[in-house]
Amino acid sequence: MPRSLLTADHLRGTALTSFLVGGFAAGWGMSGSLALPGLAGRVALILVVTAALFGFAITFLWEARGWPGATGHGSNPFRTRDYQLAVLVEIIAIPLAGRLLTMAGRPDTVMPAVAAIVGLHFFGLVRAFQSWRFAVVGAGMVLLALLSLTLPPCVTVGPTGAPLGVRAAVVGLGCALLLWGGIAPLVIGTWRQMGEAV
C-alpha cells in the first residue's frame, strides 16, 4: 500500500482496538481458565497472546507519529452515536441480567447471559466501524452462549471429585478465542500495510 493511504488515524484506531480487545479477551480467557484445573498453562498462553496484541498496539502508536494524519473520511467510530448507544445498553444490561438471574436462582447462567449481551452489543458497532467483522464475532458469542446452556454448569472429575466448571470454561475460553480471531485480520493487515509502505 502506498504510504499516503495508511494514516496515523488508522494506526491509532487499530492500536486502541487492539488494547480493548486484548484486555477483554484476557478477561474472558482468565474467567474460563479458572473453571478448569491445570491453570498455569492456559494463563501463560493468555498472557502471551495479550502481550503480543499490546506489543502490536504500542508499535502502531509509535509508528503513527511518522504517518500522514487524517484522510477526512468519516468520524472517529468511538465517538459515534451507534458506538455510545451500544456500550450504554451493554453497561445497563449486564448488571441487570446478573441480578435478575441470581435472584431467580440461576447464577450458573450469568456468564452465558453476559456473553450474549456482549455479542449483541457488537451488532451495534457494525455501522460505527463500517465493518461486518463485528457482526461475525457478535453472532459467534451469542451462539456460544446459547450452546453453553445445553452443557452442565459443573461436573466432578477424578477420584477426588474435583469440580470442573464446564459451562464457564466453554464460555470464557470460547469468547477469548472469538475476540482474538476477530482482531487478528485487522492487526495482521495493518502490519502488512506498514511493511509494504516502507
Image (spheres, rainbow, N blue to C red):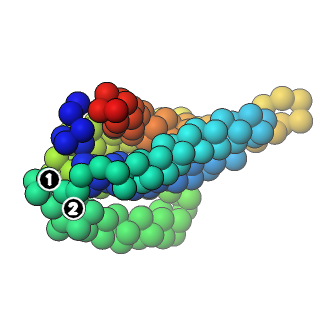
Residue identifier under label 1: 71
Residue type marked 2: Asn
Residue at 31 percent of width and 65 percent of height: 87
Q: Is residue 139 left or right of residue 111?
A: left
Residue 76 is marked as 2
Q: Which of marks 2 and 1 is nearer the N terminus?
A: 1
Location of residue 112 in the rendering, given as x and y in whole percent from the top left corner: 46, 48
Residue nearest the viewer, comparing 129 with 11: 11
Hey, which quadrant is residue 184 in on the image? top left
Label at residue 190: none
The quarter of the rendered structure image containing the C terminus is: top left
Q: For marks 2 and 1, give the CA distance.
A: 12 Å
Task: For mark 2, give the secondary structure.
Answer: loop
Q: Which residue is drawn at 31% across and 28% down?
A: 196
Circle 1 — which element?
A: loop
Furthest toward the right, the residue is 160
Residue at image point 78% right, 31% down: 157
Disc 2, disc 1: CB below 8 Å?
Answer: no
